[in-house]
Amino acid sequence: MTNPMTLSSIFAHNTDAGAIDAAIERHISDLGTPILVQVKAVHGGGVSLVGQVDVQPMVHMQDGQGKTYPHGVITGVPYLRVQGGTSALIIDPVVGDIGFVMVSGRDIQNVITSRKPSAPGSFRMHSMSDCVYVGGFLNGPPNQFIIMNGDGIRIVSPGTVRIEANAAEIACGLKVDGPITATGDVTGNGISLDNHTHMGVQTGSGSTGKPQ
């Protein structure tokens, strides 16, 4: 939205130069630019195709008298996921998140539907109907996060951290502050916890003492 017109700018538009400036300003105002928005609804997500969000621009429209009007909600906006091939970091947006939408120069609906190179869906240009959402701006402090800096990597979560894989390897020393529970056998330095034996012990009805 351009700035409200002043009396001097109105007179300036009555000149040839002013008319040209007005035409340029009008065309510039029609260009799609990044717009700060808030998420109003989330559709899809999780371990599936990237979902979409409904968003509302946060900076109101303004008329020549300075009166402001809220924007409507833009629906079905694809959002960014960090992904390469079939590997992804899934952090789906939630209602209330703040981010930017990037407005495309042409109608992108055919590409969104087919996920293939396609002709534009219409002749519209620089429309807020053709945008994508990039989140992570002006949001509050998180309660689960990963910090990476010169001191190392820290993972914090109020819930459960679950790793699902064919195997996991730790190539360093391991310190655990808490109990360890295993549903299978544990092998330490080649010795099985379930099946190891002790030499020099006579059988009997008593029980051994605690580990020393």
Image (cartoon, rainbow, N blue to C red):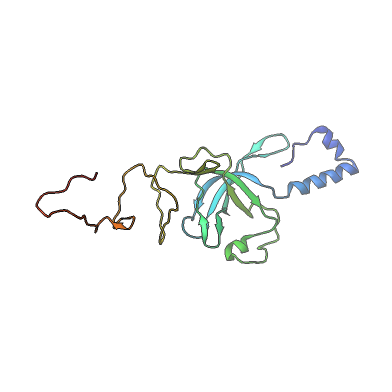
Question: Would you place residue 68 above or below residue 89 in this image?
Answer: above
Image coordinates for residue 31, horizontal then vertical, percent: 73, 50
- Residue 154 location in percent, x, y? 48, 43
Residue furthest out toward the top:
7
Q: Is residue 113 above or below residue 30?
A: below
Viewer-nearest residue: 99 or 199: 199
In the image, residue 70 above or below residue 196 = above
Q: Nearer the viewer, residue 7 or 32?
A: 32
On the rendered image, what quadrant is the N terminus found in?
Answer: top right
Q: Seen in the image, is 15 located left or right of residue 25?
A: right
**Extreme residue in the front direction:** 200
Q: Answer left or right for 90 relative to 112.
A: left
Q: The C terminus is located in which quarter?
A: top left
Residue 67's place in the image compared with 81, above or below, is above
Out of 200 and 8, give the one closest to the viewer.
200
Q: Which residue is at the front of the view, 44 or 162? A: 162
Residue 107 picture quarter: bottom right
Give x and y (percent) for residue 138.
57, 39
Q: Residue furthest left?
A: 205
Question: Which residue is at a point 65% across and 45% down the rendered structure image?
Answer: 35
Instruction: Give the total of numbered labels.
Output: 0
Is residue 186 toward the left or the right of residue 126 in the image?
Answer: left
Q: Residue at x 56, y 44 (%)?
A: 136
At x 24% / y 57%, what residue is drawn? 196
Q: Residue at x 46, y 40 (%)?
A: 143
